[in-house]
Image (spheres, grey):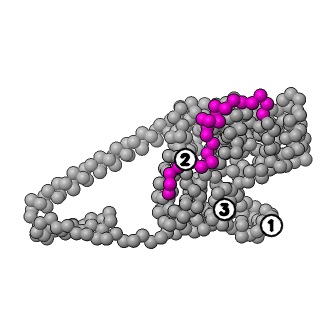
Amino acid sequence: MKRTTMKNAPDLTKAASQPRPASAPSAMPASPVLGDLSRRISGMNGNTITLPVCGREVKFTLETVPAGRVERATMVWAGNERDQQLLNTAALDDLIPSFLTSGQQNPAFGRRINGVIEVADGSRRRMAAIITDSEYRVLIGELDETQMAWLSQIGNDYRPTSAYERGKRYARRLDSDFNGNVSKLAEAECISRKIIMRCMRTAELPREIVGLFSNPNELSARAGEALAKAYEAHPEAMMALTQRLARRRKSGEDLETDDVLAQLHAVGDKPAKPAARERVFGAGVKAKYRGDVVSFQLSKAPADLLKKIETLLEQHQAEQLAVVSSEVDKAFSEADVVVTCTRAAAASIGYDITSNELLSMIPFARTAMRENQDEEKRMGVIAAEINRRYVL
C-alpha cells in the first residue's frame, strides 16, 4: 500500500492562516427539521429566544463557551447515539475548515446540569471547537429527557450516524423496549429486519477496528456484518493487525477503506507453514528451526556443555524475573497515581466518591491521564465523568 498523507483531512495550518471574513456566509442548518428554527434564530434580538420543542415553548439563552474551556465546561448528553471517540479531523472535515475561517455557523442546543452544559444537538460542532480551539455557542433551555432525545435525533439526521452507532442503539432498544423481538423493533424504526440485524452485527466489532476508517460511515452495514463474522473467527489475529494499522494511520498514512477491509479479511487466510531447517553444532548437538520455534537435540553431550547451557538459561530466567518485577512495581505505582488523581477530581466538585465507584472509574481515569499531559485538563476530564456517572 502506498504511503501518502491522510486523505480528506483538512490542512489546519493552511486554514488557520486564512483571514476571517467580515461576515460569515450563510451555512446549512444543523438539521433539516431545525431549518425553521435556524431561520428564527438568525433573526433573534439579544441573547434569548423562545422556540417550540416537542409541542412546548422553551426559552433559550445563547451562551458562548470560551475557546479552551469547551471540553471541561460541556459534555454530550448520554442518550446521543453518536460515538464521540470516533470524531476526529477526518470525520469532521465538513466543519473544521469553516470553524477555522469563520467560527461556528449554527449554535448547538442543550441544557445546564450541575453547572455543566449538556449538549443534545451539536456534538460534532463541540468536537470541532475542541480540535480547532474555537469558541462554542450553545442555546441553553429547560429541557426534559424527551426534548433532549428529539433534539439529538434530528441533529443526527443531518449527518447520519454510522451502521456501527445505529447498531448500538438498536441493541439497547431491542433489550430494553422490545424484549428481544427484532420484528417489532424493525417496525418501530421503519426499516427492514435485515438492516437491523446487519447494524447490530456491525456494532459487535471492537471500536478500535471501526476507528481504522477515516469516518465510521465508511463501514456499511453489509461490510460490517461480514467483518464481524471474520472477527468472530479470528479475534486475536484481527486485533493484532488492527494495532499495526492504527499505528500507521496515526503516523499520517492514508488507509483506503477497501484496503483496510481486504487486509482485515485476509487474517482469516491460512498462512503457509514456514520451511524447517537444521544446524549441527558438533557431535550429538542439533538445532531445528521452524518460524519462531527452535528446538535443540542433545545426545551424549559433554557435561561442561550442559553446564554452560544451564548457566545461560538461568541468567535469562533471572533477567525475565527482573523485568516482571519491574513491571509489577510500575503497575502498582501507576495505580496509586490514578487513584490519587481520581480522588482529587471528585473532591474538586465536592463529591465523596465511594470505594466501588473509585474502582469503576480507574480504567477511564487511566486513559484520561495517558491522553492528557496537562494535570488541570486531566482533573477536569475525570471530574466531568464522575459528575456524569454519579452526581447527575
Looking at the image, do the residues carrying marks 3 and 1 touch, with CB atoms under 8 Å apart?
Answer: no
Q: Residue at x 53, y 31 (%)?
A: 375
Label 3, label 1: how many angstroms apart (C-alpha)?
Answer: 21 Å
Dot 3 or dot 1: first in sequence order is 1
What secondary structure is found at the residue carrying circle 1? helix
- Amino acid bearing label 2: Thr
Lateral position of residue 275 relative to residue 271, left or right: left
Q: Where is residue 279, by image quadrant?
A: bottom left
**Residue 185 lies in the magenta stretch:** no
Observer-side mark, 1 or 2, equals: 2
Q: Is residue 355 visible?
A: no
Label 1, label 2: how many angstroms apart (C-alpha)?
Answer: 44 Å
Dot 1 or dot 2: first in sequence order is 2
Q: Mark 2 points at which residue?
A: 5
Q: Which mark is residue 220?
A: 3
Q: How crowded is mark 1: few (under 14 residues within 10 Å), some or many (20 or more)?
A: few
Dot 3 or dot 2: first in sequence order is 2
Q: Residues within 10 Å of mark 2 (few under 14, many from 20)?
A: few
What secondary structure is found at the residue carrying circle 2? loop
Observer-side mark, 3 or 1, equals: 3
- Horizontal and vertical percent position of residue 31: 80, 47
- Amino acid bearing label 3: Ser
Q: Where is residue 206, by image quadrant?
A: bottom right
Tell me which segment is drawn in magenta: 1-24
Q: Name the residue under label 1.
A: 187
Q: Which of 131 and 80 is in front in this view?
A: 131
- Amino acid bearing label 1: Glu
